[in-house]
Amino acid sequence: MKFKVIGAGLAGVEAAWQIAEAGFPVELYEMKEIKRSPAHKTDMFCELVCSNSLKASRLESSAGLLKEEMFRLGSITVPVARECAVPAGGALAVDRDIFSKKITDLIKDHKNITVVNEVVRELKYDDDTIVIVATGPLTDGELAENIKALVGDYLSFYDAAAPIVTADSIDMSKAFGASRYDRGGEADYINCPFNKQQYETFINELVNAESAVVHDFDVYEGCMPIEKLAKRGTDAPRFGPMKPVGLVDPSTCRRPWACVQLRRENAKGTMFNLVGFQTNLKFGEQKRVFSMIPGLENAEFVRYGVMHRNSFLNSPGLLNSDYSLKSHGNIFFAGQITGVEGYMESAGSGIIAGINAVRKAEGKPSFVPPEDTMLGALCAYISDVSVKNFQPMGANFGILPPIEPKIKDKKERYRALSDRALSSLEKSVKENGNEDNC
């Protein structure tokens, strides 16, 4: 049996790694050295486009639980991310260039992985080849049309990336370092505080600024452009990415009316991104409006926010819970194209697709983690035929079965959910003969 993985993003790399580590040769197709999408800037694998944060690390968080489950199933991205971590409070954020470089080197050096630099235009499959499509949310051109012919129309939405500024250009006489609720023990975030008047003036300019795209479109809530959020109501950003809860401005000894947080972008701490400030404003408007943020009056923007199209399958009608295509058992999909939302969610789907590609080749039944695990809950969500209005889903405790009897304290409840999930995963792995992975 031959294995082909199309796409060397987070999902494709994880899928190829699982196949290769199981002892099978696999071809990993990547187009970057020939062609790049509008969102990509380098030829390296696992390029992080939207943010350098892989979300929370602690086990009593849904994101932390997801990463731990992935680690126990032999993930390549989780241990590398931990090696490349930059200070970010309770979150796992990485130096994205170092992260991509390490992943690229590991993949290219693996004896069982052959990297093929090619623009794949057609899905070629037969009884002797297993294909994993991990082409991401920017799949377009002939391949997109080929997939549509195979499975029907996509659903689609738009995604956005936040601006990045240089550390030296931030006015620390107005901004201050602190992690919300002092998590992490150090001032991992830079905070730009607003008083009420400053905030209202800023919001007024934000909602009236000119966007780069004038036609209407739908945007997934997880990456809502800040200007679109502001148009929902003056206080919407203040209760979203600009919430001041858990912060005290040392210059006033009070909580700010609103606050923009900046998160370290690289290991050296020379660049910071505006947390939650994905945007579709024209570059000149971004410079003008975001320079109104206290402390960023003279900010040097090394990257402006951009919008890019994302597409995903209507997975509940098309995919099994192991990410295989219902109509063609030798074709798997993985990553954001399946409707999982987020970096690690995409990588996690690649792990499951890779494991099951191997199991199919070996004539074994599929391995799908139990639904009380985060990986298993996501598998169940993308294959749930009862879902009629399918939308992307990221890791969250709401998709796990509840704990009985109910635990009132949220932190204790989340920890109990995590403990149950990891115990359930370990048991399932042993039962399915995958002890080497766990």
Image: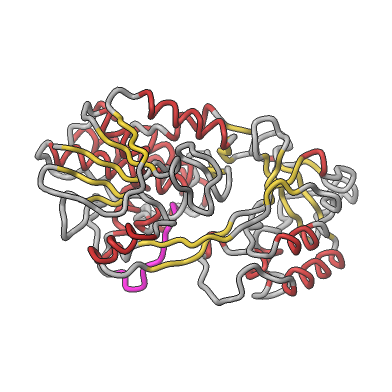
Q: In this view, does 314 lie above or below 367?
A: below
For the N terminus, the quadrant is: top left
Identify the residue shown where x is 44% and y is 55%: 341
Identify the residue shown where x is 52% and y is 39%: 58
For the C terminus, the quadrant is: top left
Residue 438 can be seen in this image: no
Residue 260 can be seen in this image: yes
Q: In this view, does 56 lie above or below 297?
A: above
Identify the residue shown where x is 57% and y is 61%: 307
391 in the magenta segment: yes
400 in the magenta segment: no
Q: Quadrant of residue 106?
A: top left
Q: Quadrant of residue 34?
A: top left
Numbered-mark total: 0
Identify the residue shown where x is 30% and y is 39%: 425
- Left or right, 433 with respect to 222, comes to left
Q: Position of residue 130 (x, y in %)?
A: 19, 44
In magenta, the rendered stretch is 387-395
Q: Please name the colour scheme applied to the rendered image.
A: secondary structure
Q: Which of 91 and 38 is in front in this view?
A: 38
- Left or right, 157 with respect to 231, comes to left
Q: Position of residue 311 (x, y in %)?
A: 41, 62
Q: Position of residue 169 (x, y in %)?
A: 82, 43
Q: Position of residue 362 (x, y in %)?
A: 12, 36
Q: Nearer the viewer, residue 55 or 202?
A: 202
Query: Magenta part mainly helix, strand or loop?
Result: loop
